[in-house]
Amino acid sequence: MSRKVVCFSWYALIPSAVLLFHHIC
């Protein structure tokens, strides 16, 4: 169950980081 949460958090974290980079650049 924790592994599922980690995978979900990664899937939610990566796009947000990409959006952040787009806003910074």
Image (tube, grey):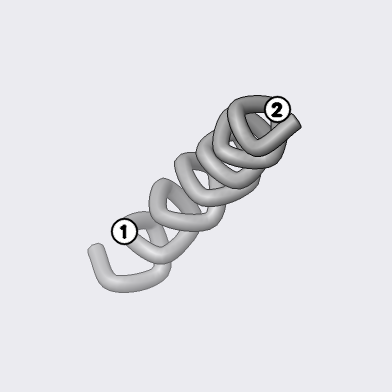
Query: Is 18 placed above or below 10 here?
Result: below
Q: Which amino acid does label 1 sit on?
A: Phe
User: Relative to the observer, which residue lies in front, 3 or 20?
Assistant: 3
Give me the residue at 75% from left, 30% from top: 1
Where is residue 2 drawn, in percent x and y?
A: 65, 37
Give me the residue at 53% from left, 55% from top: 16
Q: Name the residue under label 2.
A: 4
> Which numbered mark, 1 or 2, is in the foreground of this view?
2
Q: Is residue 15 left or right of residue 17?
A: right
Residue found at the far front of this picture: 1
Quadrant for the C terminus, please: bottom left
User: Relative to the observer, which residue lies in front, 12 or 7?
Assistant: 7
Q: Which mark is residue 5?
A: none
Q: Is residue 8 left or right of residue 15?
A: right
State if disc 2 and disc 1 touch (CB < 8 Å). Answer: no
Give me the residue at 69% from left, 40% from top: 5
Q: Name the residue under label 1.
A: 21
